[in-house]
Amino acid sequence: MREEHTIEPNELVQSYLENEDIIYEATQIFDALSDYTRFQILSALCMSSKSVSELKDICHVTQSAISHQLRLLRDRGLVFARREGQHVIYSLADEHVATLMRVGLEHAAETMSVEGE
Amino acid sequence: MREEHTIEPNELVQSYLENEDIIYEATQIFDALSDYTRFQILSALCMSSKSVSELKDICHVTQSAISHQLRLLRDRGLVFARREGQHVIYSLADEHVATLMRVGLEHAAETMSVEGE
DNA sequence: CTAATATATGAGCATCTGTTCATGTATTCA
DNA sequence: TGAATACATGAACAGATGCTCATATATTAG
């Protein structure tokens, strides 16, 4: 028998949910984390700042593909870039991202271990 | 001047990140939260279980659109359904969803208040 | 200045997504 | 049984997405 989960009445969250713009903004950060390449980029940056070519090697995609995704993440304020000589170093710009990824990964790990039983 | 954010070395998370399937599974839950309609459905269900027609009224979309999205959420194990007479009642099936939404909303609220300054 | 390396970006394209429309199924009530 | 209500679902279509390819820009070395 499954359990139902409800959150305790949280007036702050409740008030957020009445604001269309905040809901939209929230969906945007989840969207950023919903793509495999972007998730890899962000998790790599959770560990430490990295150049574009380092990210390209980690994610096993072309330089162009990485740059396009980095642009999206920049536009959404999730990473920021600084030039260092020939390289451009990207860093995480938002502390919430790490929290979200952690919870998402825990969810995923549990889901998969349950399915495998 | 902006700060860089890094997570403290978390070996559990680290090990998750080496598993392609877990990363993919994580992106799937973020994908579920990345659509406005689905986000509304899930936040409504965070408060309490609801029938399809209740959800339709809350989200201001057609019954068909709601049903299609509910199917996706069911297939991904994020909600479950039970029939109650003529109605089908949907409930949240995963406690992590509420946590993710809360963090996502907090992020959004902060982001927007910063932008508005 | 020129070549080499690193990164960014626009166009094009195949694929994916979310909705609508039409219709099917399930349950209740008379 | 037949009508009404609630929900599910397949097909189709417009728009979004993520990639590749070609090319542009920026920095450094010679």
Image (cartoon, coloured by chain):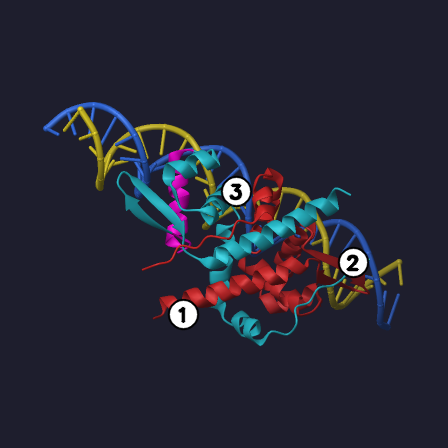
Chain colours: A red, B cyan, C yellow, D blue
Task: Name the magenta segment's main secondary structure.
Answer: helix
Q: Do the dots labelled 2 and 3 sit on one chain?
A: yes
In reply to whether residue B87 is colored magenta, the answer given is no
**Disc 2 crowd, CA 10 A, few/some/many (<14, 14-19, 20+):** few
As shown in the figure, which amino acid type bears the numbered disc 3?
Tyr
User: Residue C19: x percent and y percent?
Assistant: 45, 35
Residue A41 left/right relative to C25 = right
As shown in the figure, which amino acid type bears the numbered disc 2?
Arg
Tag 1's secondary structure?
helix
Q: Please give the range of residues in magenta.
A: B62-79
Q: Quadrant of residue A38?
A: bottom right
Name the residue beneath numbered marker 3: B36
Residue D19 left/right relative to B51 = right
Q: From this viewpoint, which residue is outermost toward the bottom?
A: B11
On screen, residue A67 above or below B38 = below
Q: Are marks 2 and 3 in contact (CB under 8 Å)?
A: no
As shown in the figure, which amino acid type bears the numbered disc 1?
Ser
Chain under label 3? Answer: B
Count the marks: how many? 3
Alpha carbons under labels 2 and 3: distance apart: 30 Å
Name the residue beneath numbered marker 1: A113
Residue B74 left/right relative to D28 = left
Alpha carbons under labels 2 and 1: distance apart: 39 Å
On screen, residue B16 above or below A83 = below
Chain under label 2? Answer: B
Q: Do the dots labelled 2 and 1 sit on one chain?
A: no
Name the residue beneath numbered marker 2: B2
Quarter that holds the C terminus of chain B: top right
Comparing A38 with A20, the one in front is A20
In reply to whether residue B73 is colored magenta, the answer given is yes
